[in-house]
Image (spheres, rainbow, N blue to C red):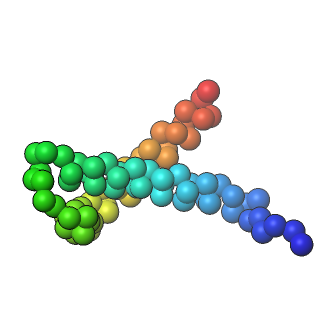
Amino acid sequence: MTPLTPPPRVKPYWRALIEVAFIVFLFYSNLLMGEFTGVNGQNKTFAFALRDIITPMNFIIAVATGFIGYGVFEFLRKKL
């Protein structure tokens, strides 16, 4: 049985999707860490922090910066 591999023409799209998703993950993890600093209060729960950071505007910002970051990384890959 051979492992499942995407066709060669689809691989760049999968790589782009994975890289953008990773940048979005880093964005949200940074926001989540910011929710638990001393400035924001001591008795916040994880659920409260998630409700506070998962908003449509934050998602739009995360996806936009994910694509910008992907573009920068691709530019650097081709230049270096």
In the rendered image, the residue lying farthest to the front is 43
Q: Position of residue 8 (x, y in %)?
A: 76, 59
Going 55% across and 33% down the picture, which residue do you hit? 76
Q: Is residue 55 visible?
A: no
Say whether residue 79 is left or right of residue 30.
Answer: right
In this rendering, the answer to whether 37 lies above or below 13 is above
Measuring from the top left, give residue 73's x and y in whole percent: 52, 39
Asked if residue 42 can be seen in this view, the reply is yes
User: Residue sitting at 10 percent across and 53 percent down?
Assistant: 41
> In the rendered view of the protein, which quadrant contains the C terminus?
top right
Left or right of 22: which side holds 15? right
Q: Quadrant of the N terminus?
A: bottom right
Residue closest to the far top:
80
Q: Residue 29 or 11: which is nearer the viewer?
A: 29
Q: Quadrant of residue 45?
A: bottom left
Q: Is residue 75 above or below residue 62?
A: above
Q: Nearer the viewer, residue 78 or 15?
A: 15
**Residue located 48% across and 58% down the image:** 21
Between residues 1 and 13, which one lies in front from this camera angle? Answer: 1
Q: Indicate whether 78 appears above or below 59.
A: above
Residue 51: % across, % down: 22, 69
x 23%, y 48%: residue: 34
Q: Is residue 50 left or right of residue 25?
A: left
Q: Residue furthest bottom?
A: 1
